[in-house]
Image (cartoon, rainbow, N blue to C red):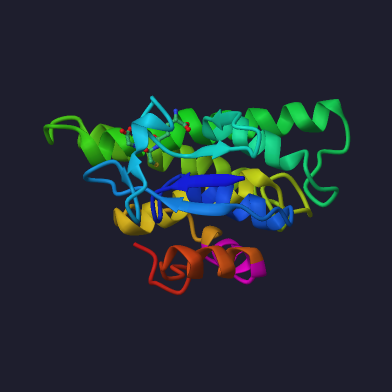
Amino acid sequence: MKLYYFADGCSLATHISLREADIEAELEEIDVETREVANGGGPYRAVNPKGYVPALVFDDGAMLTENVALLDWAAQQADALKPHDDMDRTRLIEMLAFISTEIHKQFIFLFFAPSEDGKPFLRQNIADRFNHLALLLTHDFLLGDRFSTADAFLYVMLRWARMSELEVPAAFAPYMRRIEDRPSVRAALAAERIQPRASEAAA
Ligand SMILES: N[C@@H](CCC(=O)N[C@@H](CS)C(=O)NCC(=O)O)C(=O)O
């Protein structure tokens, strides 16, 4: 199995989740500028015509894309991540969809919008979404006492908030530390050659 990723991209959520599920995947880094697979692997679009990450290619050649699908799939691969019942799974998908459409996509617009005009609006919108999630964070993890693939996704978004100097509620500081204490997260950060961010002063 191969995971196609950008270092510190949204693909980090799938990377962490695969490690949490104890699934070994070959890591194929994509150059953001050229969209070439590292080490002479050729054009990424030849693998995934969508051109963006993450993509997981199975040994039989089947490919899975889209964060929500990958994180739902990963959640089903190990007892420790698996939702307890159908409603729990739907709750997980609800959370993944929220993070994907309400936070991740707005960050993408914030990073790549050709003009500065809409950026204050986007920053406020993203901040509102983080405020909403902070209210839900009444246990160690987003969906309760157990780490889920939604935590992997939210963790990446919190890294991006730090990167963008976007203020997030104080409750996310201990949460990020909890996530970064996990061996899966440490291993994923090391493999992508990126640093922990929990100890950085919050914006
Ligand atoms: N709809 C996709 C979007 C993924 C996405 O935005 N990936 C970013 C990296 S975090 C990317 O590859 N952007 C490059 C591009 O859109 O061309 C998903 O949710 O998986």
Is 56 one of the magenta-colored residues?
no
What residue is rendered at 59% in x and 32% in y? 61
What residue is rendered at 67% in x and 29% in y? 93
Residue 45 position by quadrant: top left
Q: On the picture, is 102 further left or further right than 144?
A: left
Residue 182 makes an appearance in the image: no
Which percent across, then down, holds residue 11?
48, 46
What residue is rendered at 74% in x and 52% in y? 21
Boundaries of the magenta span: 173-183
Which percent across, then down, holds residue 69?
61, 30
Q: On the picture, is 6 further left or further right than 14?
A: left
Q: Nearer the viewer, residue 4 or 89?
A: 4
Residue 60 position by quadrant: top right
Which percent across, then down, holds residue 83?
81, 38
Q: Nearer the viewer, residue 57 or 158?
A: 57
Image quarter (top left, top right, bottom left or bottom right) of the C terminus: bottom left
Q: On the picture, is 40 further left or further right than 13?
A: left
Which percent across, then down, holds residue 194?
41, 67
As displayed, is residue 81 above or below residue 92? Answer: below
Quarter holding ligand 1: top left
